[in-house]
Image (spheres, grey):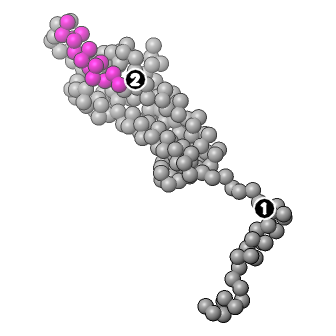
Amino acid sequence: MATDLQTTDQNRRTPWCGLSATPKLEKLVTEAAGFSHICTPDERAALVALIPGYEQALQPAPRHACRRVITKLALAYPAAKVSEEEAEARLELYADALDDIPADVLGAACAAVLRTSKFFPAPSEIRERCSGLARRQWELSKIRALIATHDRNWRPEPEPLSDEDRAAVAAIVGKVSVQPEQRDAA
C-alpha cells in the first residue's frame, strides 16, 4: 500500500526525475535552447523514449492514495473537535483540491509540510510544496520542444560527391565562370 506514495528511487529524497539516470540527456534538456538546438537522431530517439515515463509520472494519484496521504498528515496534528461527517467532508475537500497531483509528489509535499508546519495545512500550502510537479511538466515540455525542433530542422549530412558528379559540377562551374575580358571591364 505504501508504494503508491514512494519515489521511484528509494535512495533519493526528491521526487522522481526521469533525466537523473542519463546525465548527458539531463544536460541537453536543462541547458539547450529548446527551439534553436537541433539534437542528433540518437538524442532524439533517447528523448522520445523518455516521454512515456514522464506521462506516467504526471498521472494524478488515485483517489484512495490521495485520501490516505491526507489522512496520514491529519494524524500528525492534534485532532480537531469535529463530527465524523465533517471530518469525512473535509477529507473529500482536500482530495478534490489535490486530485491532479502525482502520488509521489503529493507524498513528498506532505512530508515537507509535516517537517515545517505547526498547524494542519490548507490545500494551497500543500500545493506550494509540489515543486516536483512543475519540474516534470517543464522537462516534458522541453523534451517535446527539442524533438519538434529536430523534426523541423535536422538535415542529414549529404553524401560525398562521386568523381563523376564532381566532374559534372566542375563542368557547370566552368561554364558559368566569368570570362577574362569581363573581369577586366569590371
Q: Quadrant of the C terminus?
A: bottom right
Q: Does 64 appear above or below 128?
A: above
Residue 57 point in image, percent of width and height: 47, 28
Question: What is the residue that sits farthest to the left in this orientation?
Answer: 81
Q: Earlier in the sequence, mark 2 or mark 1?
A: 2
Q: Nearer the viewer, residue 65 or 6?
A: 65
Q: Nearer the viewer, residue 169 or 111?
A: 169
Q: Which residue does the image show at 53% across and 53% down from the upper left?
A: 37
In the figure, is residue 85 to the left or right of 58? Answer: left
Q: Secondary structure at mark 2?
A: loop
For badge 2, the amino acid type reads Pro
Which class describes the residues within 10 Å of circle 2: few (<14), some (14-19), or many (20+)?
some
Name the mark on residue 161: 1
Q: Which residue does the image show at 17% across and 15% down from the upper left?
A: 80
Q: Does 183 appear above or below 94?
A: below
In the figure, is residue 175 to the left or right of 136? Answer: right
Q: Does 114 appear above or below 1?
A: below
Q: Nearer the viewer, residue 85 or 71?
A: 85
Would residue 99 be counted in the magenta stretch? yes
* Magenta span: 85-100
Whole-Å distance between the Cαs marked 2 and 1? Answer: 55 Å
Residue 170 location, quadrant? bottom right
Q: Which residue does the image show at 30% across and 27% down from the upper left?
A: 114
Assign the magenta stretch its main secondary structure.
Answer: helix
In the figure, is residue 90 to the left or right of 102? Answer: left
Would residue 29 be counted in the magenta stretch? no
Q: Quadrant of the N terminus?
A: top left
Q: Secondary structure at mark 1?
A: loop
For badge 1, the amino acid type reads Leu
Q: Which residue is mark 2?
A: 60
